[in-house]
Amino acid sequence: MFQIEKAPTGSTKCSWCGELIKKDSLRLRFAPPKGYNYYWHQECGIKYLEGLKILLKNGEKGRIGREEAEKARKDVETRVSGSTNI
């Protein structure tokens, strides 16, 4: 389950960039049925979800971590920027 919420404290690290999420700022929380909750700054959460969307469209399966999501985003950005230089 994904949830958008205000950060209740300033002591939670962002799972994307590793920096602390400031108290009362918006954050994205992913709470799987079992295990550890993941938290992202609003901007980092958007990056992660963009990567997930790309991988989902490509039919990827399994656990998608930060590295896979970031690579998918950068690959699309490279293809788009490369095609506009023609």
Image (cartoon, rainbow, N blue to C red):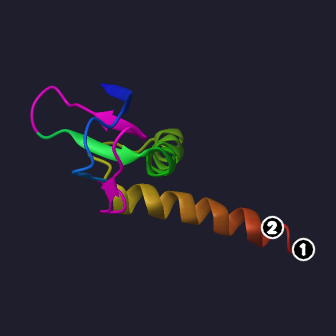
Is residue 38 positioned above or below 84 on the image?
A: above
- Res 42 seen here: yes
Q: How many angstroms separate mark 2 from mark 1 (CA)?
A: 6 Å
**43 sits left or right of 5 in the view:** right
The quarter of the image holding the N terminus is top left
The dot on residue 86 is 1
- Between 46 and 27, the one nearer to me in the picture: 27
Q: Is residue 72 magenta?
A: no
- Between 50 and 28, the one nearer to me in the picture: 28
Q: Amino acid at mark 2?
A: Ser
Please name the residue shown 62% across and 59% down the image.
76
Query: Residue 62 placed where, x, y %?
Result: 27, 43
Tag 2–tag 1 contact (CB < 8 Å):
yes
Q: Residues within 10 Å of mark 2 (few under 14, many from 20)?
A: few
Is residue 16 positioned above or below 40 on the image?
A: below
Q: Secondary structure at mark 1?
A: loop
- Between 35 and 44, the one nearer to me in the picture: 44
Q: Residues within 10 Å of mark 1 (few under 14, many from 20)?
A: few
Mark 2 = which residue? 83
Q: Tell me the quarter of the picture where residue 3 sits.
A: top left
The quarter of the image holding the C terminus is bottom right
Is residue 62 positioned above or below 72 on the image?
A: above
Query: Residue 82 placed where, x, y %?
Result: 76, 72
Segment tinted magenta in the rendering? 15-35
Is residue 21 positioned above or below 34 on the image?
A: below
**58 sits left or right of 39 in the view:** right
What secondary structure predominates along the stretch shown in magenta? loop
Please name the residue shown 31% across and 35% down the image.
29
